[in-house]
Amino acid sequence: LAKTTQPISMDSYEGQEVNITCSHNNIATNDYITWYQQFPSQGPRFIIQGYKTKVTNEVASLFIPADRKSSTLSLPRVSLSDTAVYYCLVGDTNTGNQFYFGTGTSLTVIP
Amino acid sequence: EAGVTQSPTHLIKTRGQQATLRCSPISGHTSVYWYQQALGLGLQFLLWYDEGEERNRGNFPPRFSGRQFPNYSSELNVNALELEDSALYLCASSQTGGAYYGYTFGSGTRLTVV
């Protein structure tokens, strides 16, 4: 299983763009990269998933370089409600082999 | 569409007792996953059930067990409760065999062992 490494915490001012990077040096060919958001005492919520290059949805963008050894979650113009823990997961979605959440990045948005 | 539902919301047990936690997946989802999250810590993978079978298991002792029923709902049983089992237990579901569209999590069961 690919191990992921993320910064423990980040602070950002409201309205700024936030980029959270995840390292996954031993990612396998069939592995996808998925990001989740978790608020206290709630289950994580799916944000975005990708395999390579760039993926964008209404909430975030995901940038994946050609070697796929890292990925960057980009949150445009964050608000106070984006204060949460963000997790990246790497695994083979076809086999369900994407179980292990890392420590996550605790993002605090400052007014 | 109903989300993943877990019951009970809160559960208080005494050390040495057994706890049973329940999860109903989203309609059409056949895979159920269980996670433990101790206060202030990350999510620890417990179990994966798919089509009624246990497919994978995290690094937990055998007193953590479960099952998946024909309607794809699931139970997590924790025997011989210890104080350190106090945690938020989260259930997630996904479509068969994988998580291409991501896991959908329930709101969890807060288990307190006293």
Image (tube, rainbow, N blue to C red):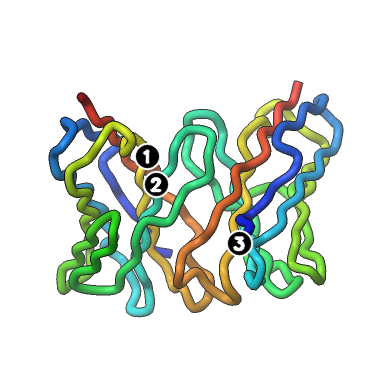
Which residue in the rendered view is the most extreme toward the top?
B114
Left or right: where A99 falls relative to B113:
left
Q: For numbered disc 2, what is the local secondary structure? A: strand
State the residue in front, B39 or B74: B74
User: Residue A19 at what x, y percent from top left?
Assistant: 18, 48
Judge if badges 1 and 2 mark residues of a common chain. yes
Residue type pointed to by label 2: Gln
State the residue in front, A65 or B70: B70
Residue type pointed to by label 1: Val
State the residue in front, A69 or A88: A88
Q: Residue at x 66, y 67 (%)?
A: B27
Q: Quadrant of residue A66?
A: bottom left
- Chain of the residue where label 1 is placed in the rendered structure: A
Q: Residues within 10 Å of mark 2 (few under 14, many from 20)?
A: many
Q: Residues within 10 Å of mark 1 (few under 14, many from 20)?
A: many
B21 shown above or below A93: above
Return the mark for residue A85. Answer: 1
